[in-house]
């Protein structure tokens, strides 16, 4: 299929205004870096996701599902293929009793607000995570002692055959920053979150406590992808990086945060290449000092 023909088909299965060509990805990821995607498509329903994915697979064109862009690094040369953004058009949240029914594009912060408004406790840990429900299910997002595996009842996905499948908590195989969704390339569509009735004032207080901790300890004033490295067995990545003497260490515009060494930040007009080089140097220096292999938490896609 010719490029113009493929583009026309994309617009047919979604809409004219929600298909962007050569869209700069630094507008859509929290690191604020990344070159243009061949096609950037904002999808508004599970039917649109299925139709775009089918079109890509039939034509041998790569695609990637993007939420809020908070745990990803896209190369300076961009992405050859289609980026499907699952966000505002698929962000509905419904509360029934002690359960929240939410679509994949719903922000975790918005889900936490809905839980608070309904005096439901158990989701406070996620109130400050800057991602969507879809991404959180893929990587079993967690913070401050809580994880998605603690609250997810079931998740509806498009499976490897692009058929709808509902997975229970056990079937999700949720582990440290992983899941069966990640391993098999499923696409999250929606989920049920099971919480408990609580006291609204106490829930609000806990959320505010966690917000203050983030403000004090995390470099929220700079673009980043959150924690850069997974937690090594028996260690803390930030402490290892700090003890290696890398606080404030900089490559180009990318820097190890002076506030929290577990964060690589876009200090001043960093490129994706700067960030990759800084991450590699951190890994090398920590390995040499402590013989510990650091594994990046963020996903890297596109051309570097």
Image (cartoon, rainbow, N blue to C red):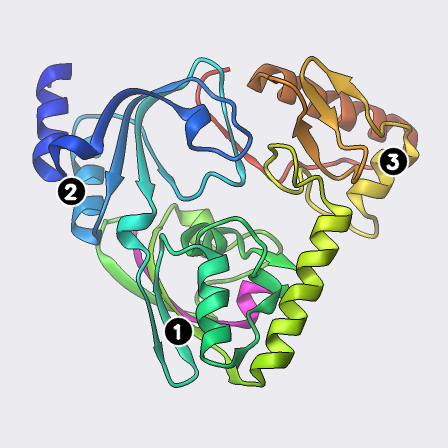
Write the residue at 38% across / 86% down. Answer: 97
Write the residue at 68% across / 24% down. Answer: 267
Across and down, in percent, residue 92 comes to 30, 62
Write the residue at 53% across / 61% down. Answer: 174
Q: Earlier in the sequence, mark 2 or mark 1?
A: 2
Q: Which residue is mark 2?
A: 51
Across and down, in percent, residue 187 comes to 34, 50
Answer whether labels 2 and 1 touch (C-beta < 8 Å): no
Query: Which image quarter is the N terminus in?
Result: top left
Label 2: which secondary element: helix
Residue 232: in sight, yes or no? no
Q: Which residue is mark 3?
A: 242
Label 3: which secondary element: helix
- Left or right of residue 123: residue 286: right
The front one of 172 and 140 is 140
Across and down, in percent, residue 296 comes to 65, 36
Label 1: which secondary element: strand
Q: Is residue 30 above or below residue 49?
A: above
Which disc, if any, is residue 149?
none
- Left or right of residue 293: residue 146: left
Q: Is 270 within the magenta?
A: no
Q: Which residues are magenta?
A: 147-159
Q: Which residue is mark 1?
A: 100
Q: Residues within 10 Å of mark 2 (few under 14, many from 20)?
A: some
């Amino acid at each position: 299929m010719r490029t113009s023909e493929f583009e026309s088909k994309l617009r047919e299965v979604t809409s004219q205004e929600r298909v962007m060509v050569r869209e700069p990805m630094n507008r859509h990821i929290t690191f604020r870096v990344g070159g243009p995607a061949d096609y950037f498509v904002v999808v508004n329903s599970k039917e649109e996701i299925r139709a775009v994915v089918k079109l890509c697979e039939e034509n041998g064109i790569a695609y990637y599902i993007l939420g809020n862009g908070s745990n990803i690094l896209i190369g300076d040369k961009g992405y050859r293929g289609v980026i499907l953004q699952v966000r505002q058009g698929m962000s509905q949240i419904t509360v029934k009793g002690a359960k929240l029914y939410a679509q994949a594009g719903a922000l975790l912060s918005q889900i936490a607000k809905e839980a608070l408004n309904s005096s439901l406790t158990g989701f406070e840990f996620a109130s400050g995570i800057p991602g969507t429900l879809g991404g959180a299910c893929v990587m079993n997002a967690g913070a401050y002692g809580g994880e998605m595996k603690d609250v997810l009842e079931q998740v509806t996905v498009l499976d490897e055959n692009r058929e709808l499948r509902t997975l229970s908590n056990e079937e999700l195989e949720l582990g440290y920053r992983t899941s069966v969704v990640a391993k098999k390339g499923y696409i999250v569509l929606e989920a049920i979150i099971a919480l408990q009735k609580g006291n609204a004032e106490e829930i609000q207080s806990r959320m505010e406590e966690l917000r203050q901790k983030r403000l004090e300890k995390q470099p929220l004033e700079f673009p980043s992808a959150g924690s850069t490295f997974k937690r090594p067995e028996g260690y803390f990545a930030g402490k290892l990086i700090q003890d290696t003497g890398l606080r404030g260490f900089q490559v180009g515009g990318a820097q190890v945060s002076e506030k929290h060494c577990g964060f690589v930040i876009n200090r001043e007009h960093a490129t994706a290449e700067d960030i990759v080089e800084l991450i590699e140097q951190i890994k090398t220096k920590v390995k040499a000092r402590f013989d510990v292999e650091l594994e990046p938490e963020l996903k890297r896609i596109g051309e570097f």
